[in-house]
Image: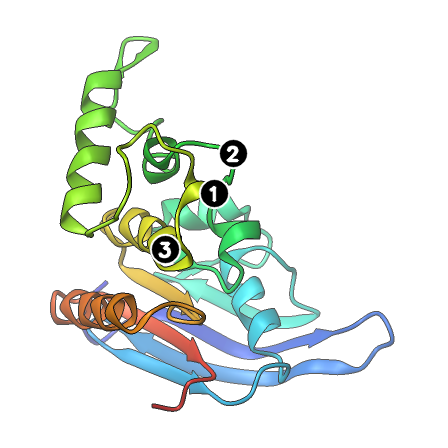
Amino acid sequence: ASPAEPILKVSELTFADPTGAKVVDRVSFQLRKGEIMGIAGVEGNGQSQLVEMITGLKRPTSGEVLINGQLTNHLSVKTIRDLKTSHIPEDRMTYGVAAEGSIGENLISDRYDRKGYQNGIMLNVKKLIEEAKELISSYSVRCDGHTQQVKMLSGGNIQKVVVAREFSSEPELIVADQPTRGIDVGSTEFIRRKLVELRDRGTAVLLISADLN
């Protein structure tokens, strides 16, 4: 997308709950390359449903979501991710990681099927392990190595695993939903700094936060 064209375009987006009450009511906005757009306020005002519609976890009642000009209303989560969309979910243990999996498995779970990560019909395990180790180092994940189970880590380090995977996939759009909730000050500052670095490289960032600071 050119700088002038929105990477994310949300038009008249509406989501009604099973009772018919509108949780998201005709929301429209555009987000361009190199911008951070913040959606702030107390939880429970439709932010979660908005994120879920953009990332493919929920279908809109009406309205449209376009990512890089492509209508995504009925696309799968995987197809939306393939449009260079990354998502840091609000609930890291439900949507962010496979708790029983290793750190390494979680770090490369979005790229094992990409070109360069396979040798014929086999996975290029050496390359995947090297990448996992590199991400552990560059994102300062405190752990006992790439084979350790994710669920054994602290909350801040689990979040770093999620962030390392999502930020390293060369995204054009990042949807960051409460990315620093419930983690220590050091991890919070680290994640904020990484978001700004990605913005400076031209990534579009949609940041949802109840932390008005």
Residue bearing mark 1: 151
Give the CA distance from mark 3 to mark 2.
22 Å
Q: What SS does tag 3 mark?
A: strand
Q: Are marks 1 and 2 in contact (CB under 8 Å)?
A: yes
Q: Name which residue type carries label 3.
A: Ser
> Can residue 116 be seen?
no
Camera-nearest residue between 33 and 196? 196
Please report whichever mark, 1 or 2, sits nearer to the chain's N-terminal start: 2
Q: Is residue 154 left or right of residue 36?
A: right
Q: Name which residue type carries label 2.
A: Glu
Give the CA distance from mark 3 to mark 1.
22 Å
Camera-nearest residue between 207 and 4? 207
Q: Quadrant of residue 111?
A: top left
Measured as percent of width and height from the top left, residue 90 is found at 50, 65
Q: What SS does tag 2 mark?
A: loop
Q: Is residue 36 left or right of residue 212?
A: left
Q: Name which residue type carries label 1.
A: Lys
Determine whether 44 is above or below 119 in the image.
below
Q: Are marks 3 and 2 in contact (CB under 8 Å)?
A: no
Q: Quadrant of residue 14?
A: bottom right
Measured as percent of width and height from the top left, residue 23 is found at 69, 80
Determine whether 7 is above or below 123 in the image.
below
Determine whether 32 is above or below 139 in the image.
below
Residue that appears at 30% across and 29% down? 114
How many neighbours does mark 2 have within 10 angstroms: few (below 14), some (14-19), or many (20 or more)?
Answer: few
